[in-house]
Image (cartoon, coloured by chain):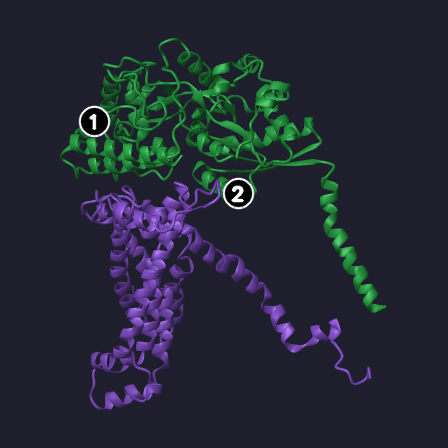
Amino acid sequence: MKRFLTLLLAALLICALAMPTVSAEEKTQLTILWWGSQTRHDLTVAMIEKFEEKYPEIDLVMDYSDWGGYWTKLAAQVAGGQTPDIFQMDYAYLAQYATNNVLAPLDEYMASGALDVSNVSENIIKTGQVKGVTYAISTGTNAPVMMYRRDVLNDLGIEIPMTPTLTEYKEISKKVAEATGLRSTFITDCSADILRFRLRNYGLNLYNDDASALGFDDPQYIVDMWQDALDAQHEGWGMIPGEETAATAFDSMVNDSWSRFQNSNELAAYRDATGLDISMVQIPNLDDATASATYLKPSMFWCVAQQSEKKDAAIKFLNFFTNDPDCFDIIGVERAIPISSEMRAHVSGNLDEVGQQVAAFIEYASQPGNASPLMNPDPTVHSQVAELLGQYSEQVRYEMIDDLLGTAQQFIEEANAILAAAQAAQ
Amino acid sequence: MVKNAPRSLTLRERMNRPNVAGYVFILPFIVGLLVFTVIPFFTSLYLAFTEYNVLSPAKWVGLDNFRKMFYEDKLFWTSFWVTFKFALIQVPVKLTVSLLVALVLSRGTKLTSYYRAAFYIPSLMGSSVAIALLWKQLFAFNGVINQALGMLGLPSNQRWLGDPKTALGVLISLGVWQFGSSMLIFLAAIKNIPASFHEAAIVDGAGPVRRFFSITLPMITPILFFNLINQVIGSFQAFNSSYLITGGKPLNTTLYYGVHLYNRAFNHYEMGYGSAMAWFMLLVIAAFTALIFRSSSAWVYYESEGR
């Protein structure tokens, strides 16, 4: 009898444990993962609550992180077979995740209208494609920008043009450094991003079309970038390596630098985090530029996991994000300017001051001549190439290298070797 | 017939056997050991011979990762020597400091227990992120250290963390500052030395220095040996301070082996390469530990040996 009772209790316990999964079957549970600042987290949580209100049969389990931890977190979840049903994707990682079969193709849902893209231009849809298959839907259009401390420039009575030349930027930097001690980190950054801007000024690209090699072979482009950084350091208005005091990128605009390269949709986050009057202009173009350094790009994407068993529900969320005014009433342009023309018209009516500035900026960059065409997504070994350039740039900035030309040549050879090896492995 | 046959045990009897309770009690530990140590240990051994980008299944490449490590990856040797230098400086300094503090604290005064706690606190917070960030702030270009120097009229524009000459030193100082646990172990060993040894030496006219080198030091060599091995292993595995404070900069002068491993594995998604690096470090640590063990017969004194 006692044994029977024990068994009965055990059976009851098992039933009790199983209960939650039974009731959850009524609701479709989806996991969602994104990266961002606190500003984005707050807005996204509110937006998702709105979505759940409109689609009571769907329950979204939210998880988020900052940019740095995101790619470790996502990769670990993929490796563990726990890929989130919906997750944010960046242009730099799109090809890598698509070619490893992590992402679900979206074409059939676009064809059936479940993911309505009738108000989205073909060019924008193409940015989410890898080898002709659509794996990702852009959250919005943005552009690289030069953020700057408007309060500082106003105090000094300096005006910065909407599209400054590098010479104009240098002149302003010198005045600001003299008056306030804030220096330039843009001129001394010397990262792959900065090199990319300089190359685009000449109609070139960081990589060639199939990313089998760099998109240029003249080391002088790199030497010029390094020389500008060294001159700025010597003249006292460029940041000396090791003198940065900021613990975060936000802080750097408070203590270290009056300007900084970021993306247009990040304006609100920078204002919220610093509490300062921060504004933006286009990335400075070189004086002899033949094309704009600026380009319009997908700010980020939403993707659905290939292994997800609830793709239909996930697509509902993607459609909500792309086409529902209720979504944009909450998030505005924090994930950049909506890709649907109808939503663009909808948000332009009721944006706050920051949102209006972001929208106006993209409008400006969309004018002919103000932006150059988008390049292909970066190859999977971009992080290695960028790190290699970073290593050499650091040595240059610490003045460990006299022969800039030879070093630039060496970088080009080593980068091409990395790209060729990656090409051969595919 | 049934009566005499060995009866199989009921579940209740099985569960009541004394060693079952023991197994049940250590079960949480066994599961943890298997899941978090043993299985990952052997998985990483396998992965060391593969190319594994996390997103798609691992591909067997034999010894290719090791070839890349030794012949292609310049930062591999850079990080190896940085770690070696870090260990070579930090271990002796930290052992000396902790032994000296233990000697001072071994004399009983009213404040001793307060001081013992105070000196141990940095070790309690030791591996935490907060302390690393505190260190970063202290030694920042506009940090407390430079401001204090400025107030004393000394040059206050030293780039402590940005200068290739000083950055590693700052990280070593953080490690040395966390001497608490080895100090406590030394303290216990010093307290264990019979007072009669010192009394006899005093009668013979030995001063404090002579007594330290002839009594205290030989008596605590087993503990010194223990602390030495612990510190060597800990230094080779260092990660936090570099990752959080300098990120390996400037000019890779603080790029610990562990940080380089992490960058390759988690930033470039090269898990196979990272595993290979981890196994190489395991062999290096094993070699050093073996070396120290071998040398121990020459300098470690055990009372029970009756020498």
Q: Colour of chain B?
A: purple
- Please give the name of the residue rendered at 71% of the width and 30% of the height, measured from the top-left corner: A56
Q: Regarding mark 1 in the picture, which secondary structure is present there? A: loop
Q: Residue A286: x percent and y percent?
A: 25, 18
Three-letter residue code for mark 1: Pro
Q: Colour of chain A?
A: green
The quarter of the displayed image where residue B178 is located: bottom left
Residue under numbered circle 1: A219
Q: Kindly report the distance in space between the C-alpha atoms of the residues bearing marks 1 and 2.
A: 41 Å
Q: Nearer the viewer, residue B277 or A54?
A: B277
Q: Which numbered circle lies on residue B116?
A: none
Check the image and name the residue furthest to the top. Answer: A368
Q: Residue B189: x percent and y percent?
A: 36, 77
Q: Nearer the viewer, residue A44 or A194?
A: A194
- Image quadrant in which the N terminus of chain A is located: bottom right
Decide: few, some or many residues near mark 2? Use Cα within 10 Å; few <14, some 14-19, many ≥20: some
- On the picture, is A425 further left or further right than A130? left
Q: Which numbered circle lies on residue A77?
A: 2
- Image quadrant in which the C terminus of chain A is located: top left
Q: Residue B101: x percent and y percent?
A: 31, 69
The quarter of the displayed image where residue A182 is located: top left
Check the image and name the residue furthest to the left. Answer: A402
Q: Regarding mark 2 in the picture, which secondary structure is present there? A: helix
Label located before the other in sequence (1 or 2): 2
Tell me: residue A261, above or below residue B23: above
- Please give the name of the residue rendered at 44% of the width and 12% of the height, measured from the top-left corner: A363
